[in-house]
Image (cartoon, helix red, strand yellow):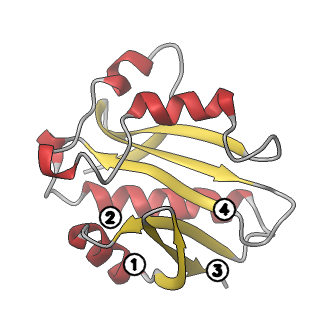
Amino acid sequence: MKVRLKYVTRENWEEALALKVKERQSNFVPPVAVSLAKVHIKPDGDNIVYLPFAIYDEEMMVGFIMHAYDENTANMYWINGFMIDESHQGRGYGRAALSEMVHWITNRFTGCKEIRLTVFKDNEKAQQLYKRFGFVPTGDVYGEEDVWFLPIK
């Protein structure tokens, strides 16, 4: 497996829109179309930049992940919209993609002191992945989701 992140562009956006999670997971992550809309709508404010990525194994798209950030902060570096397509789950793509995203963020933003994400209380698989990776709950809640963070040294 050689996981890499590629920006979602006019060349691959339609393939990204076709990605979906299992039915029982559909309440845990927005459809890719919603994440892509955030790039232009900027629901969290004009100071937030949204960068959508397709997750690839070689030339095969296996998932989606988005980074949202405010570069003028130390802790507003978010991972959201993260999903592995239902046909590719259970093969290690989630951990590999999370690792790639964390490395991408920390290599690009030297002022980043923590990376944040949200996770539903019922999403036990995602919580296990995030715990194993070093994320911990902040105790904050955003909507119906718990906020977790990964301290960056």
Decide if residue 78 is on the left or right side of residue 101: right
Q: Are marks 4 and 2 in contact (CB under 8 Å)?
A: no
Which residue is drawn at the image coordinates 30% and 33% (left, top)?
61
Say which residue label 3 marks: 152
Say which residue label 2 marks: 95
Which residue is drawn at the image coordinates 24% and 36% (left, top)?
20
Above/below status of 97 relative to 145: above
Element at badge 2?
A: helix
Above/below status of 27 relative to 116: above
**First in sequence: mark 3 or mark 1?**
1
Say which residue label 4 marks: 77
Above/below status of 49 relative to 89: above
Say which residue label 1 marks: 133
The amino acid type, in three-letter code, at marker 4 is Tyr
Q: CA distance from mark 1 to mark 2?
A: 8 Å
Q: Quadrant of residue 7?
A: top right
Residue 63 percent location from the top left of the image: 32, 41
Decide if residue 134 is on the left or right side of residue 128: right
The amino acid type, in three-letter code, at marker 1 is Phe
Mark 1 surroundings: few (<14), some (14-19) or many (≥20) residues within 10 A: few
The amino acid type, in three-letter code, at marker 3 is Ile
Residue 146 percent location from the top left of the image: 45, 73
**First in sequence: mark 3 or mark 2?**
2
Residue 28 percent location from the top left of the image: 31, 54
Q: Are marks 1 and 2 in contact (CB under 8 Å)?
A: yes
